[in-house]
């Protein structure tokens, strides 16, 4: 089984509380976070990361870091003119985070573009493709449209599309465009990993039950609806189990990304739905106990 996580890898500045001027520099990004935690949780899986970087020093360091985590980087594209984007994390006293971004001209925005055409042939060899709404949002409209058309043709008995509707309104031209594009992917999705807050913001439901009902109505029959500390709702076989709270919450960055990794690691190595849901929840509980997106090994 070969898995490709697709998206934008960024430089991360994790800021110390005011008035400190200190910041820890790392590398992260929603689909990259999932790729790293997935490989850590299931080392036997072949996990690739697909993005576009530059030829600058930070891009080189980022490649070295991703390689040190065991990720296959054979399909990382290179831009001759662009560099990675950057974001800064600030957290409040409860561990809830806020972000500031510098990503408008990042190399990843040129992903899949070669000589004026959209090219996806490097993805043909994978059994599982994982992407998020951020992956979709950073692509030009025409590339995003062609990618969705290609994914519809790519899917098959031994191929699965995994999607997380990680919603960042500022990345989209309008809420209407985001809603339309994300709804289209849900129709193609084999394993759905949405967060309840994102789905309610995009589609306007009032609670998790309404979100889960819409997901099932559009054909989703496998996955998890993430509901933060309350624990996930199964989008596959019904599951009734209690989820213990995190013992310590320092920074909620990558909580959803790490849940996705724990869930997929269990599911793709043969565990059942209940075990996969618990694995995702417990990994997320560990990750929110440290600062930044990527916990120390």
Image (tube, grey):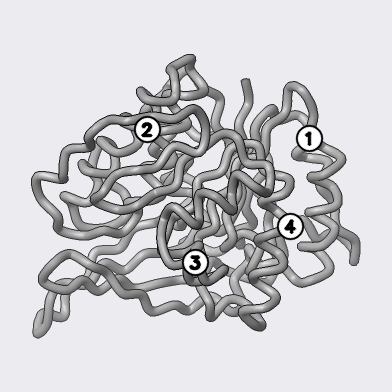
Q: CA distance from mark 3 to mark 2?
A: 23 Å
Residue of label 3: 205
* Mark 4 Cα shell of 10 Å, populated few (<14), some (14-19), many (≥20): few
Closer mark to the observer between disc 4 and disc 1: 4
Q: CA distance from mark 3 to mark 4?
A: 18 Å
As displayed, is residue 254 above or below residue 260?
Answer: below
Report whether residue 250 is seen: yes
Numbered circles on residues, count? 4
Q: Position of residue 54 (x, y in %)?
A: 61, 62
Label whose residue precedes the other's in the sequence (3 or 4): 4
Q: Residue at x 31, y 59 (%)?
A: 253
Q: Position of residue 249 (x, y in %)?
A: 14, 55
Foreground of the two, 74 or 17: 17
Q: Position of residue 188 (x, y in %)?
A: 73, 45
Label whose residue precedes the other's in the sequence (3 or 1): 1
Label whose residue precedes the other's in the sequence (4 or 1): 1
* Mark 3 Cα shell of 10 Å, populated few (<14), some (14-19), many (≥20): some
Residue of label 1: 155
Q: CA distance from mark 3 to mark 1?
A: 29 Å
SS under mark 1: loop
Residue of label 2: 277
Residue of label 4: 184
Residue 293 sits in which quadrant? bottom left
Label whose residue precedes the other's in the sequence (2 or 1): 1
In the rendered image, the quadrant that contains the C terminus is: top left
Foreground of the two, 16 or 184: 184
Label whose residue precedes the other's in the sequence (4 or 2): 4
As displayed, is residue 297 above or below residue 294?
Answer: above
Marks 3/1 in contact by CB < 8 Å: the verdict is no
Q: CA distance from mark 2 to mark 1?
A: 24 Å
Q: Residue at x 42, y 58 (%)?
A: 196
Q: CA distance from mark 4 to mark 2?
A: 25 Å
């Amino acid at each position: 089984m070969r898995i490709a996580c697709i998206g934008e890898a960024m430089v991360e500045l994790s800021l110390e509380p005011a008035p400190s001027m200190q910041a820890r520099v790392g590398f992260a990004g929603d689909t990259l976070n999932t790729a790293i935690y997935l490989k850590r949780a299931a080392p036997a899986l072949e996990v690739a990361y697909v993005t576009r970087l530059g030829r600058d020093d930070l891009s080189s360091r980022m490649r070295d870091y991703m390689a040190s985590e065991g990720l296959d980087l054979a399909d990382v594209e290179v831009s001759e003119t662009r560099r990675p984007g950057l974001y800064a994390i600030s957290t409040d006293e409860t561990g809830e985070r806020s972000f500031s971004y510098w990503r408008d001209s990042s190399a990843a925005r040129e992903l899949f573009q070669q000589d004026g055409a959209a090219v996806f042939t490097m993805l043909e060899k994978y059994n599982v493709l994982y992407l998020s709404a951020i992956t979709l949002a950073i692509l030009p409209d025409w590339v995003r449209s062609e990618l969705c058309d290609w994914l519809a043709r790519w899917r098959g008995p031994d191929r699965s599309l995994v999607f997380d509707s990680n919603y960042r309104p500022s990345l989209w031209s309008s809420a209407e465009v985001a809603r339309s594009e994300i709804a289209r992917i849900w129709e193609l999705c084999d394993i759905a990993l949405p967060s309840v807050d994102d789905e309610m913001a995009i589609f306007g439901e009032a609670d998790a039950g309404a979100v889960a009902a819409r997901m099932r109505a559009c054909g989703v029959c496998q996955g998890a609806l993430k509901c933060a500390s309350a624990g996930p709702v199964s989008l596959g076989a019904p599951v009734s189990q209690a989820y213990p709270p995190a013992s310590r919450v320092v920074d909620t960055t990558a909580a959803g990304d790490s849940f996705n990794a724990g869930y997929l690691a269990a599911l793709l190595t043969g565990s059942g739905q209940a075990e996969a849901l618990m694995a995702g929840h417990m990994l997320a509980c560990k990750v929110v106990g440290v600062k930044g997106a990527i916990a120390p090994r």
